[in-house]
Amino acid sequence: MKLKNIVKFGAVAVASVAILAACSSKTSSGKETINFATVGTTNPFSYEDKSGNLTGYDIEVAKAVFKGSDKYKVSFKKTEWSSVFAGLDSGKYQMAGNNISYSTDRAKKYLYSEPTGTTPTVLTVGKDSDIKSFDDIGGHSTQVVQGTTTAKQLEDYNKKHSDNQVKINYTEEDIPQILRSLNDGKYDFKLFDAPTVNAVIKSQNL
């Protein structure tokens, strides 16, 4: 099966999250280490290159911010999405970046970088799918990671469509794994950020 994107939704604000720097540590050079959490699988925002090094828009922006700093050194920490905000709350991480959507609830606890960017959300299905628009997703299955913007969108959808809900399967898999499962016919659709979906489909020939 091949995948196709059938509709784009309104743009979602994204940015890197900061700062709980009081919990940082010092290196032998005397610089404070800022631990930057990221999932590292959301190309083009945060992913590993062919040599296994983290790169992507969020990573390169953070590198540029700290380049030449006499006081701070950034250290990138790859982790699961479920650990990002827990790590910020505990002081394990001082910053995070992973195409993170803005929400009023998050903004009450964390500082966002300015300016923020925007990316559209896309509905992705198999090419032979009977889903033609967002209105058709009821009764169909998908995978989501808990605590993400996509999860909230679908949970809100189910509240409004109690008679024909989406079958939500919560997972800790990353987006390439989720799209492979969709391509294999295990699930019916996926909502996610268009740049990442397009990058994964192209790189994996889905």
Image: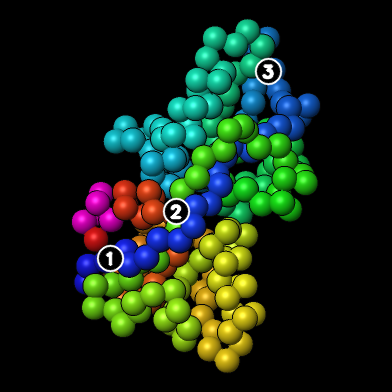
Q: Identify residue for label 2.
A: 120
The percent position of residue 94, horizontal first and vertical second, equals: 68, 33
How crowded is the residue under tag 1: few (<14 C-alpha within 10 Å), some, or many (20+)?
many
Q: Residue at x 71, y 32 (%)?
A: 19
Q: Is residue 125 left or right of residue 11?
A: left
The numbered mark, 3 or 1, whose residue comes first in the sequence reads 1
Q: Amino acid at mark 2?
A: Pro
Magenta stretch contains residue 202: yes
Give the CA separation, mark 3 to mark 1: 46 Å
Q: How many marks?
A: 3
Alpha carbon of mark 3 to alpha carbon of mark 2: how far? 36 Å
Which residue shows up at 54% across the image and 31% down it?
A: 76
Foreground mark, 3 or 2? 2
> Is the residue 182 above or below the residue 160 in the image?
above
Which disc, if any, is residue 4? 1
Percent position of residue 100, x then y: 56, 46
Quadrant where the C terminus lies? bottom left
Q: CA distance from mark 2 to mark 1?
A: 15 Å
| Residue 43 at x, y percent in the picture | 38, 44
Secondary structure at badge 2 equals strand
Q: Is residue 40 visible?
A: yes
Q: Give the residue at x 71% y 51%.
A: 104
Above or below, 178 against 199 in this view is below
| Closer to us: 187 or 135 | 135
Q: Picture quarter containing residue 134?
A: bottom left
Magenta residues (range)? 201-205
